[in-house]
Amino acid sequence: MEMILMGMGGCAAYDVVHILGRGRVPVSDCVAQLEAERSPDVPSVFTKIRLHFVVSGPALPDNKVSRAVKLSAEKYCSASIMLQRGGVEVEHSYEVVDTTARDA
């Protein structure tokens, strides 16, 4: 089950970084943090997954990060979309870390 979460996190993080890169937004790091809840009954399938992105870079525009997360969730991340269509509640959130002061 952990491999499924890792695959979903990798797929979604790749999408976010790729979308931002195509928009010429300089990303220095993107971490996908996942939490999941499983059914108490056998088979113990996922019932809820929370996917939180921590996206770092110099002066990242919040609206572009938000758009990238939304596009990944709704259009590009096949793993996330497959789990949602299978009945898993999937939540996406993000935070932006400005590395401008660190890079100076």
Image (cartoon, helix red, strand yellow):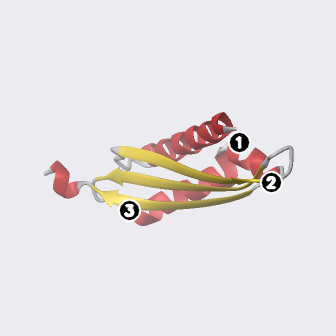
Give amino acid for label 2: Pro
Q: Position of residue 15 (x, y in %)?
A: 55, 43
Q: Alpha-carbon distance for marks 3 and 2?
A: 41 Å
Q: Quadrant of the N terminus?
A: top right
Q: Position of residue 66 (x, y in %)?
A: 51, 62
Residue at position x 51%, y 46% in the image: 19
The answer to whether 50 is drawn above or below residue 14 in the figure is below
Residue at position x 82%, y 51% in the image: 85
Label placed on residue 61 = 3
Q: Which residue is mark 1?
A: 78
Give amino acid for label 1: Ser
Q: Farthest bottom residue?
A: 63
Residue nearest the observer in this picture, 95 or 69: 95
Instruction: Tell me the element at label 3.
Output: loop
Q: Alpha-carbon distance for marks 2 and 1?
A: 26 Å
Q: Position of residue 2 (x, y in %)?
A: 64, 38
Label placed on residue 40 = 2
Whether residues under marks 3 and 2 lie with C-beta atoms below 8 angstroms apart, the answer is no
Instruction: Tell me the element at label 2.
Output: loop
Whether residues under marks 1 and 3 lie with C-beta atoms below 8 angstroms apart, the answer is no
Q: Alpha-carbon distance for marks 1 and 3?
A: 26 Å
Q: Position of residue 48 (x, y in %)?
A: 71, 57
Label placed on residue 28 = none
